[in-house]
Image (spheres, helix red, strand yellow):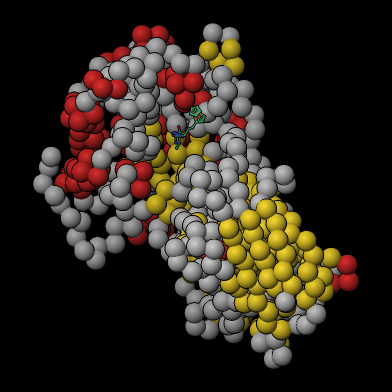
Amino acid sequence: MGVQTVPSPGADRFAWWRQARFGMFIHWGLYAIPAGVWKGQEIAGIGEWIMARVPIPVAEYEPLAKQLNPVKFNARAWVRVAKDAGMRYIVFTAKHHDGFAMYNSPSSDYDMVDATPLHRDPLKELADACREEGLRLCVYYSQAQDWHHPDAAGNSWDFPDEERKDFGRYLREKVEPQLRELLTQYGPIGLIWFDTPRVITQEQSNALRDLVHSLQPECLINSRIGHGASDYDSAGDNQIPVCVRPKPWETPATLNDTWGFKRNDDHWKSPRTLIRLLVDIVSKGGNYLLNVGPTAEGEIPEASIVRLHQVGNWMRVNGEAIYGAEPGPFLCESNWGAATKRSGKLFLHIFDWPKGALLLRGLRCRVRYAYLLADPERRPLAVTHYRNAVLGFEELRVALPTEAPDANVSVVVLEIDGEPDADPKPIQTPDGIISLEACQAVLPAPAGLDRSGLAVRWTEQARPIEWEFKVVTPGTFDVEVWTAAARNTVWQGTADVSIVVAEQQRRATLTDKDRRASDRSPHQLYSVTRCGPVRIDQAGTAALRLTGVSSAEEPVPSLRMVRLLPVGEGA
Ligand code: H79
């Protein structure tokens, strides 16, 4: 398949994507017709999965194509919604798991032009609109699951005989011709977004990558092509790493709880949540690919448009702190908000406006000038540096006006000398809390961090994980261990933990009794196990050792952090 074309070394194929930071995912397909309801029954789960969830036989799903008549479809209008929100690229579902090509696919009859009354090519119209409005066009392609093809992965209700399936034949008959079409009919494609690799082999993933690059060497490929044949990492759906990740990555995310349109999903995120998710993602080095699910008539739901417009209002003022921005010097989430940097400027994205001043511990750079990004006059903010010589850390105090310039996220710009630098050791924050994140620990092998920044294999040899941290206000603390839990699934496995801090030992068995959503993402849940109180009598550098023990049979939840929560006089 194709000649192997290695993209030219040194060429920065990522430049546009890093600059963009914010893109629009579009899930549009036949599933928009039932929109989550089949034969009068509300079907649970994500809308584009309705065929598998019911399950609907191919013979019953296919005729939906004749009903697709999106008279209100206007590619220009969609692209303008994305542009208005500040998005710089669009990823369109050319073919989702249902196998229906939402573009003109000459190699297939199960496509927009042959099977619908529309006889138009929405991808061609999107390509033209993107070119005119200056956005990058990209496509989603489900390369392994195809519920319409008897040899592909996924459809066990029409094609139950796994023995007779020839996955290679499906790749040759359908995937390769369609990828050729997608990469030759529409001009430059920014990236191809593959999904659910399932049964694909290393060789097959490599062959798809080579085919893509033989046709368009600049085209980026996400990690769901499988087997690392990719250019960048896709986080899990709606999943955001807990700390800065150095490799390029992107979070695909929903505006409500579905990708494909569902008429009854009103669980919309607020503009505030969306803006904070964008800031959080960029502050950790990622891109935010935020989804809309247009209706069968061809319209982006009004509820999506109004929210995206609010995000756009924020971007029009604060875009400088997002486009082309990199993570600030802090490895982990800060309780006051998040930091990004760009060309000698450090941007402090403040979530909850503090009274009078922002106190920042651990920032080790000289600030020359500070102002609010929303202030067109750039009036200076008073900045005071302190050095706590006894405890050995820097503190910065930025005086703030009474009123937040933005109700959702307000950005303070710090013009600094040199590269921003932060204390690598966790420091107790002014609210008294000490957060010890997995990515700040010394992790003995075979323990390591997964792509979300959570510790995995951390109990395998029962070797202690260690943190050194700085205590400012001594006192009594409740010790909590945070492990990752997934939404809609059972928290699995357990481990016994021992914690040693200030010569006190506490033991606990991890449980799922106290499950909490992260304050950053409504889709991310943690199970918090309380291990009892400890006393730390002295300010200064302290150490904590966590040892996990598990049985070989049971899975072990990934570890996010140990948190020391002040109680009583220490608060
Ligand atoms: O395109 C979107 C999703 O359709 C796709 N990835 C994003 C970008 C995706 N493919 N698979 N998954 C997501 C995982 C799906 C799991 C579930 Fe289900 C589908 C949970 C509920 C419906 C499988 C079927 C498990 C229960 C029913």
Q: Residue furthest bottom?
A: 389
Residue 253, position in %: x, y? 52, 42
Q: Residue furthest left?
A: 3
Q: Please tell me which residue lies in front, 25 or 475.
A: 475
Q: Residue furthest right?
A: 569
Please give the name of the residue rendered at 33% of the width and 57% of the height, measured from the top-left corner: 14
Q: Is residue 183 above or below residue 549?
A: above
Q: Please tell me which residue lies in front, 318 or 378.
A: 318
Please give the name of the residue rendered at 47% of the width and 26% of the height, measured from the top-left corner: 48
Please give the name of the residue rendered at 66% of the width and 63% of the height, measured from the top-left corner: 498
The answer to which quarter of the image holds residue 550 is bottom right
Q: Is residue 466 above or below residue 353?
A: below
Please give the name of the residue rendered at 10% of the width and 46% of the height, measured from the top-left corner: 3
Image side of residue 82 versus residue 206, left or right: right
The answer to which quarter of the image holds residue 93 is top left
Image side of residue 429 versus residue 366, left or right: right
- Can the viewer see residue 305 in this picture? yes
Residue 390, position in %: x, y? 71, 90
Q: Please tell me which residue lies in front, 448 or 524.
A: 448
Q: Please tell me which residue lies in front, 160 or 7.
A: 160
Residue 98, position in %: x, y? 38, 23
Q: Is residue 530 above or below residue 251?
A: below
Tell me the quadrant of the picture where the C terminus can be found.
bottom right
